[in-house]
């Protein structure tokens, strides 16, 4: 089977992440939002709190929260959750610094895999995260990436085995873990895990994004025919 073929759903349910750690990336400057977006309220819960709660619901070995400029506010927001907050002093240099920190923490902890998720994807669920483990367990895979149908373009969240974690340790600049996923020499070893939920790809960057999320979460249920609200915009990146 081609490594980049979509993964079929596991009829026995999602695979646990007990031998993995999850890194929630929340070190961005929120420049386009104008205020600390990670602490914005979503139906009574801060966005970063929800991201960490979802990570914990996936039942990993450990959850790291990588913070930057707004460390005090963000760490206080999740103080009631069993997550380890880490300060990225190089956050001004771009996303890669947070990814490097996450990879180094995972390697130091001896984890079998590292899941990286941004703190600003409000429609992620624990099921999305645990499904990634199915992809990584395919023979020869060193990473698994999420994708939404029909395009199946690799996106966050992503899961990395130690071989791929070491590649993450070399990243530089303002590009995240997708640099590794999209590397032509790595792609044959990346399992693409498809999802049918287009809202999974939604990330919050601007006040307009936030207003749209508030409108969506205020609905009693999301309509089945909901079109992808980000179809004309960039994908979420870890």
Image: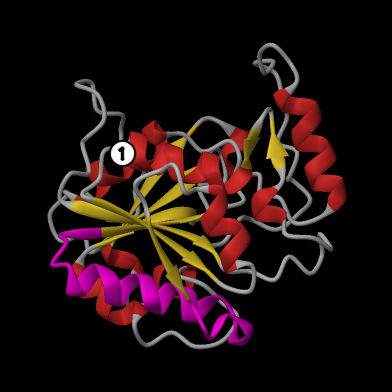
Residue projecting furthest to the top: 220
* Magenta span of residues: 88-113
Asked if residue 30 lies left or right of residue 176, the reply is: right
What residue sits 12% from the left and 54% below the top? Answer: 139
- Residue 81 horizontal/vertical position (percent): 41, 43
Q: Magenta stretch: residue 148 in it? A: no
| Residue closest to the eye, 155 or 184 | 155
What residue sits 73% from the left and 45% below the top? Answer: 230
Whether residue 145 is visible, yes or no, is yes
Q: How is the image coloured?
A: secondary structure
Task: State whether residue 95 is above or below residue 194.
Answer: below
- Residue 173 horizontal/vertical position (percent): 56, 87
Asked if residue 27 lies left or right of residue 139, the reply is: right
- Residue 150 horizontal/vertical position (percent): 56, 39
Q: Main secondary structure of the magenta part?
A: helix
Task: State whether residue 58 is above or below residue 35.
Answer: above
Badge 1 is on which residue?
130
What residue sits 60% from the left and 87% below the top? Answer: 93
């Amino acid at each position: 089977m081609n490594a980049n073929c979509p993964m079929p759903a596991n009829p026995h349910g999602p695979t646990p992440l007990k031998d993995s750690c999850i890194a929630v990336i929340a070190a961005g400057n929120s420049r386009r939002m104008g205020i600390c977006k990670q602490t914005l309220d979503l139906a009574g819960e801060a966005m970063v709190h929800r991201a960490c709660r979802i990570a914990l619901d996936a039942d990993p070995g450990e959850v790291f929260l990588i913070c930057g400029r707004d460390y005090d506010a963000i760490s206080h927001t999740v103080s009631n959750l069993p997550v380890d907050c880490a300060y990225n002093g190089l956050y001004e240099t771009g996303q890669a610094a947070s990814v490097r920190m996450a990879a180094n923490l995972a390697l130091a902890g001896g984890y079998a895999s590292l899941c990286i998720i941004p703190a600003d994807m409000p429609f992620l669920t624990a099921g999305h995260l645990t499904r990634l483990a199915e992809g990584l367990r395919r023979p020869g895979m060193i990473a698994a990436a999420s994708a939404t149908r029909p395009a199946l373009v690799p996106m966050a969240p992503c899961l990395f085995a130690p071989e791929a974690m070491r590649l993450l340790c070399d990243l530089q600049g303002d590009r995240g873990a997708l640099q590794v996923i999209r590397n032509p020499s790595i792609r044959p070893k990346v399992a693409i895990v498809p999802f049918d939920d287009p809202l999974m790809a939604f990330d919050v960057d601007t006040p307009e994004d936030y207003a749209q999320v508030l409108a969506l979460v205020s609905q009693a249920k999301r309509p089945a025919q909901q079109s992808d609200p980000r179809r004309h915009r960039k994908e979420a990146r870890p």
